[in-house]
Amino acid sequence: MDLGSALFISAGGYQHHIGMNTWHSAGAGPRAVSLGLGDVRLRMPERSDVLALADRARHSGIVTDDDRRSLQLRDPWGTLLTVTP
């Protein structure tokens, strides 16, 4: 869910697992290595869920790397996201 100044992400119909404020992020560019999360690891229920995420990411122009064990991509601020089933 995107509220304009905050994002909430979830899986499996749960209200939200992770909430992120975004109000000062517009145009901020990559984050400094010393700030915030630099590596986020997410587990999804099935490989098909990971593949669906990869398709959505590529459709949005996001570069992905899938070695069949995990999917890796970076958010707009340079945070490495690793997604596994």
Image (spheres, rainbow, N blue to C red):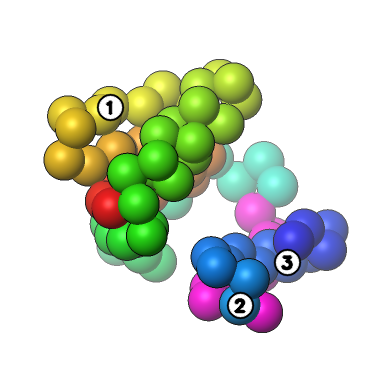
Image location of residue 75, percent across then percent down: 47, 42
Image marks 3 and 2: residues in contact by CB distance under 8 Å: no
- Above or below — where is 23 with respect to 18? above
Nearest to N terminus: mark 2 or mark 1 = 2
From the image, tell me which residue sits under label 1. 65
Element assignment for label 2: loop
The quarter of the rendered structure image containing the N terminus is: bottom right
Look at mark 3 in the image and give the residue it sits on: 6
Front residue of 59 and 80 = 59
Q: Is residue 20 magenta?
A: yes
Give whichever of discs 3 and 2 has the lower sequence position: 3
Task: Relative to 50, say whether 68 is above or below.
Answer: above
Residue ID at (41%, 23%): 63
Q: CA distance from mark 2 to mark 1?
A: 27 Å
Q: Quadrant of residue 51?
A: top left
Other residues around mark 2 within 10 Å, as few (<14) / some (14–19) / many (≥20): few
Query: Going by the image, does 24 lie left or right of 50?
Result: right
- Image coordinates for residue 12, horizontal then vertical, percent: 55, 68
Q: Residues within 10 Å of mark 1 (few under 14, many from 20)?
A: few
Residue 80 in sight here:
no
Q: Secondary structure at mark 1?
A: strand
Whether label 2 touches label 1, CB < 8 Å: no
SS for dot 3: strand
Tell me the kind of residue under disc 1: Asp
Gap in angstroms between the C-alphas marked 1 and 3: 27 Å
Region in magenta = 15-25
In the figure, residue 42 lies in which quadrant?
Answer: bottom left
Q: Around disc 3, counting alpha carbons within 10 Å, would you say few (fewer than 14), some (14 to 19), or many (20 or more)?
A: few
Residue 77 in view here:
yes
Q: Which residue is mark 2?
A: 14
Q: Which residue ends up furthest to the right in the rendered image?
A: 4
